[in-house]
Image (spheres, rainbow, N blue to C red):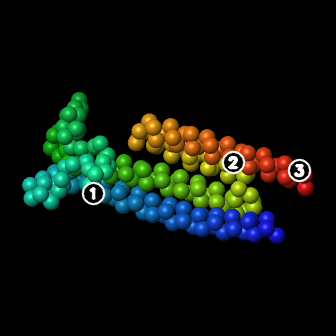
């Protein structure tokens, strides 16, 4: 009887996890659409966007810092784009004429791409929860593969964005989780064979 209660609790937790990951995937998709629209609008505004940003900087309403409080968002600012040189005269003219619109348009585009990646990862997680619910076991090859893919991608993102230490920590965590799930799968197979 206890086994059935444990399985029911696992299914309930997985159902909640599936719903939460699905909601966050929808939020990521909405974020992707919003930032993509913003990127297109900023690129189309061009010089008008730069004029509005410059006016905001002069009035003290807008800051050129890359920091929000004490958190550094991206190492991506307008001063660096002034160093970019292009052999294509039209591109160089645009870089010289309206660097703010190019910088923040690209910034919004990068966030849009990150939102797409996040949505895909969340759908993989949601799918793993779905498999656990359907197959009555957390240790199938499909579930392990999905969890492993998500954790490898997150570890790679940590390695590329935050620091080598966080990337290595993510890699070690991925290896530990994989080992535990593989051990659980082995125990499950042994248990099924003895029945």
- Please identify the residue farthest to the front as the structure is shown: 2
**3 or 1: mark nearer the eye:** 3
User: Residue 122, can we see it?
Assistant: yes
For marks 2 and 3 on the same chain, the one whose residue lies earlier in the sequence: 2
The answer to whether the residue labelled 2 contacts the one labelled 1, judged by CB atoms less than 8 Å apart, is: no
Disc 1, SS? helix
Disc 2, SS? helix
**2 or 1: mark nearer the eye:** 2
For image coordinates 44% across by 36% down, the residue present is 164
The residue labelled by disc 2 is 181
* For residue 21, above or below residue 120: below
For image coordinates 63% across by 46% down, the residue present is 177
* For residue 175, above or below residue 52: above
For marks 3 and 1 on the same chain, the one whose residue lies earlier in the sequence: 1
**Gap in Å between the C-alphas at discs 3 and 1?**
61 Å
* For residue 38, above or below residue 15: above
Q: Nearer the viewer, residue 177 or 137?
A: 177
Give residue 165's position: percent from left, percent from top.
45, 37
For image coordinates 59% across by 59% down, the residue present is 126
Give residue 125's position: percent from left, percent from top.
59, 56
* The N terminus sits in image quarter: bottom right
The residue labelled by disc 1 is 41
Give residue 182's position: percent from left, percent from top.
71, 45
* The C terminus sits in image quarter: bottom right
The residue labelled by disc 3 is 193
User: Dividing the picture into quarters, in which one does residue 88 lie?
Assistant: top left
**Gap in Å between the C-alphas at discs 2 and 3?**
18 Å
The answer to whether the residue labelled 3 contacts the one labelled 1, judged by CB atoms less than 8 Å apart, is: no
């Amino acid at each position: 009887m206890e086994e059935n209660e444990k399985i029911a609790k696992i299914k309930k937790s997985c159902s909640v996890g599936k719903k939460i990951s699905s909601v966050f995937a929808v939020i990521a998709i909405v974020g992707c659409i919003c930032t993509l629209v913003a990127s297109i609008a900023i690129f189309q505004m061009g010089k008008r966007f730069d004029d509005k940003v410059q006016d905001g900087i002069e009035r003290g309403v807008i800051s050129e810092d890359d920091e929000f409080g004490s958190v550094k968002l991206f190492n991506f600012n307008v001063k660096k784009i002034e160093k970019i040189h292009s052999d294509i005269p039209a591109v160089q003219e645009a870089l010289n004429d309206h660097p703010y619109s190019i910088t923040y348009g690209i910034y919004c585009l990068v966030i849009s791409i990150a939102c797409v990646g996040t949505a895909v990862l969340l759908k993989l997680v949601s799918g793993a929860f779905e498999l656990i619910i359907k197959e009555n076991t957390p240790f199938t090859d499909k579930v392990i593969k999905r969890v492993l893919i998500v954790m490898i991608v997150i570890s790679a993102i940590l390695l590329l964005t935050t620091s080598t230490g966080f990337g290595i920590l993510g890699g070690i965590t991925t290896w530990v989780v994989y080992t535990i799930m593989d051990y659980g799968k082995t125990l499950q197979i042994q248990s099924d064979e003895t029945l």
